[in-house]
Amino acid sequence: MSTVRVSNRKTPTMSAGTSHAGTGRETTGPAKQTSKGAWAHDRIRAEAYALYEQRGRQEGRALEDWLNAEGQAVAANNS
């Protein structure tokens, strides 16, 4: 009878140029960059949530809120 041991422990990896300050968080490296599309998506998401809250958190109208938020973003971008 043989025994097989399986380890699920993952070894942390670090990319070149990354330092570890010992605090559990990265202190050097390039600044986080957000693409224009991701920025627009986050802005629309936040506006859609604001619309949801303005309606008293009424469920079932997420698509309507999203489309209204998109329309507001397009109008603001065109002005």
Image (tube, rainbow, N blue to C red):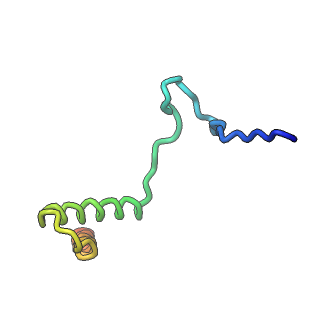
Left/right placement of residue 44 relative to residue 34 reads left
Q: Is residue 8 left or right of residue 70?
A: right
The quadrant of the rendering that contains the N terminus is: top right
Viewer-nearest residue: 11 or 41: 11
Relative vertical location of residue 44 with respect to residue 15 in this rendering, above or below:
below
**Residue 29 x, y percent position in the rendering:** 53, 37
Q: Residue at x 81, y 39 (%)?
A: 3
Quadrant hosting residue 17: top right
At 19% from the left and 65% from the top, the residue drawn is 52
Q: Residue furthest right?
A: 1
Considering only vertical position in the picture, is 24 above or below 74?
Answer: above
Q: Nearer the viewer, residue 59 or 68?
A: 59
User: Is residue 33 shown left or right of residue 47?
Assistant: right
Count of labels shown?
Answer: 0
Q: Residue lying at the far top in this picture: please name it.
A: 22
From the viewer's perspective, tell me whether residue 18 is left or right of residue 68.
Answer: right
x and y percentages locating residue 19 in the rendered image: 58, 29
Give the residue drawn at x 21%, y 69%: 59
Question: Horizontal and vertical percent for residue 46?
Answer: 26, 59
Quadrant of the snapshot with the C terminus: bottom left
Q: Residue furthest front?
A: 1
Task: Depth check: give the residue in front, 20 or 8.
Answer: 8
**Residue 2 rendering spot, x and y as whole percentages:** 86, 40
